[in-house]
Image (cartoon, rainbow, N blue to C red):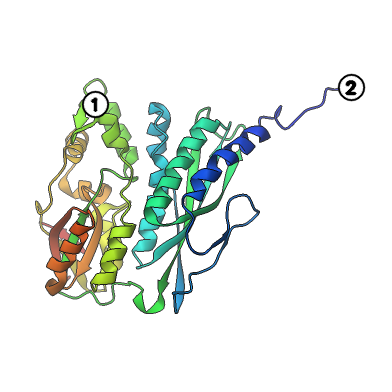
Amino acid sequence: MSQSPLSYKDAGVDIDAGDALVERIKPLAKRTMREGVLAGIGGFGALFEVPKRYQEPVLVSGTDGVGTKLKLAFEWNMHDTVGIDLVAMSVNDVLVQGAEPLFFLDYFACGKLHVDTAAAVVGGIARGCEESGCALIGGETAEMPGMYPAGEYDLAGFCVGAVEKSKILTGRDVAPGDVVLGLASSGVHSNGFSLVRKCIERAEGQLPATLDGQPFRAAIMAPTRLYVKPVLATLAAHPVKALAHITGGGLLENIPRVLPEGLAAHLVKGSWPQTELFAWLQKTAAISDYEMNRTFNNGIGMVVVVAAAEAEATAATLRAQGQTVYEIGHIAPRGSGAPVEVG
């Protein structure tokens, strides 16, 4: 018995939709181009030449996703900022080594490709790259029928940066008496959303209309702050000793990653304000200050460690770059205590 022919589209993969998405992406990616790009979107591989101003370049790589924040993007049909989250999670990590992000690649996977949704996501990725001075030079869109529920997708991002070998930040020079500066976050960023979603479920029907002057959903979905340009400008002007990107594990687990053995960060409770967003999360989840500082960034998205004599000038430079800066603590011998104390 003869059978009718089957096409790839019959199997659930729409090549034409993929081609249409590529055409939508190209002008977005073009806006992110910078020195070093030799070939970008459209080839089998993207080419990038390390800028010649580097004398001893060391490449720094990072990869990350957006996590379960995507579940709210699907539910609320808010797709235009999760791409910024994707970029920020990787470029901020690369920045912590003192590196300038050079280029970025993304991976977008779905069961059925909806061009408008994918274009909104990639538009956010392009904006994040543009704001970070990072070229979006490639990526992959994978349409895989049966792998994802209808209307859902997953994201992964990959960033490569460069830093002069002599300027790599390792935290090895951090010493007792150094000052800990905190740069304000824009909200929850992209960590802790499994708990955020539980809080929303618990408070269903009694959700606040606004938080911190924004509509509730906008406050929850505010994209991760991009610290690249302000911090790079500060590194060029001041002898910063260490940086810590406050992601999963919050303040309590990320700051110790850049401290030498035997030292601890003593943070002063109340030295930075708790926003309405984090106050609502803490009240709704009914959790302790300790759990807040271990689960969320709790209002501080990046930590900068400097010598006490440099603290005021460094903070002034960061503020001039548009950052909200708080002096949140100091470095001390650890003794028998925890690597981060808040009190």
Identify the residue shown where x is 21% and y is 67%. Answer: 305
Residue at which label 2 appears: 2
The answer to whether residue 38 is above or below residue 18 is below
The C terminus, quarter of image: bottom left
Locate residue 145, reporting x and y percent: 62, 32
Residue at which label 1 appears: 203
Locate residue 319, reporting x and y percent: 18, 57
Identify the residue shown where x is 41% and y is 51%. Answer: 130
Residue 324 visible in the picture: yes
The answer to whether residue 134 is above or below residue 281 is below
Q: Are marks 2 and 1 in contact (CB under 8 Å)?
A: no
**144 displayed left or right of 338:** right
Residue at the farthest right position: 1
The N terminus, quarter of image: top right
Q: At label 2, which amino acid type do we have?
A: Ser
SS type, badge 1: loop
Residue 331 visible in the picture: no
- Precedes in sequence: disc 2 or disc 1: 2
Choose between 68 and 34: the one closer to the eye: 34
SS type, badge 2: loop
Q: At label 1, which amino acid type do we have?
A: Ala
**66 displayed left or right of 37:** left
**129 displayed left or right of 268:** right
Identify the residue shown where x is 14% and y is 44%. Answer: 274
Identify the residue shown where x is 42% and y is 34%. Answer: 79
CA–CA distance between discs 2 and 1? 58 Å
Locate residue 330, reporting x and y percent: 14, 66
